[in-house]
Image (cartoon, grey):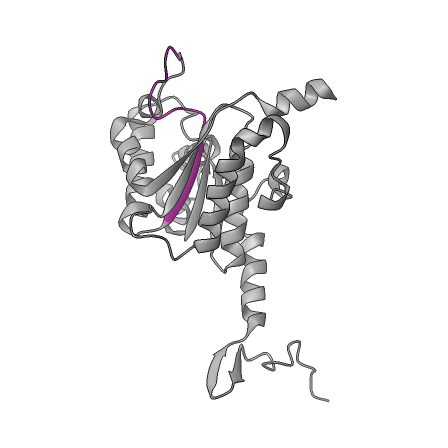
Amino acid sequence: MNAVSSCPACNDSGWQTVGDRVQRCPCRLRQQIAQNFSLSGIPARYVSADLSNFRIDGDQQRFAGAHFIAAQYAERYPVLPDDHPRGLIFTGTIGTGKSHLAVSVMKELMRKGCAARFYDYASLLKDIQSAYRPDSQISEIAMLGPAMEVEVMLLDDLGTVRLSSWVLDTITLLLNCRYREGRTTIITTNYPDQLAGTAMMPTLAERIGERVASRIREMCRPILMEGPDYRTQMRKAA
């Protein structure tokens, strides 16, 4: 008995004839999207995050502009204006929804078939450092390679690790590689690009080095999200 194909449109070949043209069957895109999500590394906390459920009511109305820019970027991708950097960097205070929006954009790109990976900055550096242990079965480059090569990388909480020569070398290597290859990098950080007024918060350049911060300015369009900690407000209300 012949096996029944799971996709009658292409008989599981991955190709279908439309008029006088042969094109990829949509079933392959669906398979690619499912694989992209399974390998994305999105934390459980953000599994349900989406552009459609990012709250912009009440005090969150101040972030309507950030939401619009993020949604517009995701809709246009990968065809962006010539003067538009390939990536985005969400900058602002804790609890304003930066990671929610960044993950939402990442998901939209995955739905277009892009391979993407979520990395927590501190955890990534810790994993790379573990490669230096005598009993480690994996090399530093094997640990860093996937972050260098994935089509879209989301680097969350950039700057949370104290700067050292090793941290500087590692983050420089990672971002320079992605920059040279024209890959898309989405970043979130609590550290401002420039000091504002009498703010005591160190700048991003002080946390990762001016050379790396300058490279990010070339790679990413800034989206500022300053405001009260929304998560704290919700806990107080509860």
Does residue 234 appear left or right of residue 138 in this picture? right
- With respect to residue 68, does 200 lie above or below? above
Q: Is residue 93 left or right of residue 54?
A: left
Tell me, yes or no, if residue 130 can be seen here.
no
Relative to 56, is 22 above or below?
below
In the rendered structure, does residue 168 fall within the stretch colored magenta? no
Q: Quadrant of residue 133?
A: top left
Question: In the displayed structure, does residue 40 sit left or right of residue 190?
Answer: right
Please identify the quadrant where the C terminus is shown: top right
Residue 86: x percent and y percent? 35, 48
Look at the image and say whether residue 193 sits in the magenta stretch.
yes
Q: Position of residue 136 (x, y in %)?
A: 44, 39
In the rendered image, which quarter contains the N terminus?
A: bottom right
Q: Main secondary structure of the magenta part?
A: loop
The stretch in magenta equals 184-198
Q: 125 or 72: nearer the eye?
A: 72
Residue depicted at 40% across the width and 56% down the height = 78
Query: Which of the 4 quarters of the picture holds residue 218?
Result: top left
Q: Is residue 89 visible?
A: yes
Q: Position of residue 84 (x, y in %)?
A: 33, 47
The answer to whether 188 is drawn above or below residue 202 in the figure is: below
Q: Residue at x 62, y 45 (%)?
A: 52
Q: Position of residue 93 (x, y in %)?
A: 49, 23
Between 1 and 44, the residue placed more toward the observer is 44
Which residue is situated farthest in the left direction here?
211
